[in-house]
Amino acid sequence: MTGDAHAELLQAIGGALGEPGPYIEIVGERLPEISLGTLSSPPVTLTREVLGGAKSASGRVAWIELRSDKPEGGYVPVEIDLRVAWEGELRSITDVDTYNPYFGCRVLLARWYADEFLFVYREKHKMIVSRLAPPYEVPDNVVLSDDLIEDRDILYFVRGDAVWGLMLPSLQPVAPVKFEPTGRWPVYELWLEAPGVARLATVLDTEGASWDERLASARAGAVTLLLSREPQ
């Protein structure tokens, strides 16, 4: 999210909560050392950060918020939740599913579909799509993969020997597109070539080759896949 987009989101949150100005993030003081687990410095005072969110056409605002505070007994208290507000009132707070909130999460997509809110995020181990519909109490979560693209309101991702798709916002699966896997532990790169057409590169662990050489070779031999839009 760009600086301007983030500022607009904070302004929208403030308006949805009935505040006179933008929602205020809290930049807390942090310890000087870096944690190897999160590659960031643990807080010593309260920190509040908006990781992403969006405003609907009807004025509802949803945002993902991270709060952390000073360590207690070697444990850093961290919470990540999804909040929904409109017409001057906070209407819902639900937990964002993570392996451990201390490791944070990165929001890749946040979007409203009428009164349903959907966002995609990466936590420590998984890529997840989460959907929240009225009354905004229990989210629907589906685990994706890091090899992820979007084409015309369908999320496509690699799992096993196929490219799978989920329609947005229903999360209804589309028919998988099979491919021939290569290698025992392949690393994939998936990208959108054109609407309805994806390219899939398989990066092999070639002995003696650098990562850049392996990636260039994989991209040169990438296969073309016609993306499915048919319900499974």
Image (spheres, rainbow, N blue to C red):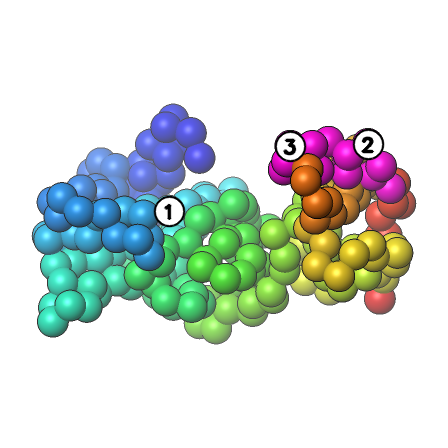
Give the residue type that dot 2 points to.
Answer: Ala
- Residue identifier under label 3: 212
Residue 132, x across and y down, in percent: 51, 63
Q: Name the residue under label 2.
A: 220
> Magenta span covers which residues?
210-223
Q: CA separation, marks 1 and 2?
A: 36 Å
Say whether disc 2 or disc 3 marks the residue closer to the N-terminus: 3
Q: Could you tell me which quadrant the N terminus lies in?
A: top left
Q: In which quarter of the image is residue 207?
A: top right
Task: In this rendered view, identify the residue nearer to me: 89 or 99.
Answer: 99
Q: How far apart are marks 1 and 3 (CA)?
A: 32 Å
Residue kind at label 3, given as amino acid type:
Asp
Above or below, 203 against 219 in this view is below
* Mark 2–mark 3 distance (CA, rounded to whole Å): 12 Å
Instruction: Judge from the rendering whether residue 108 lies leftward or rightward of residue 211; answer left or right.
Output: left
Residues under numbered marks 1 and 3 in contact, where contact means CB atoms less than 8 Å apart: no
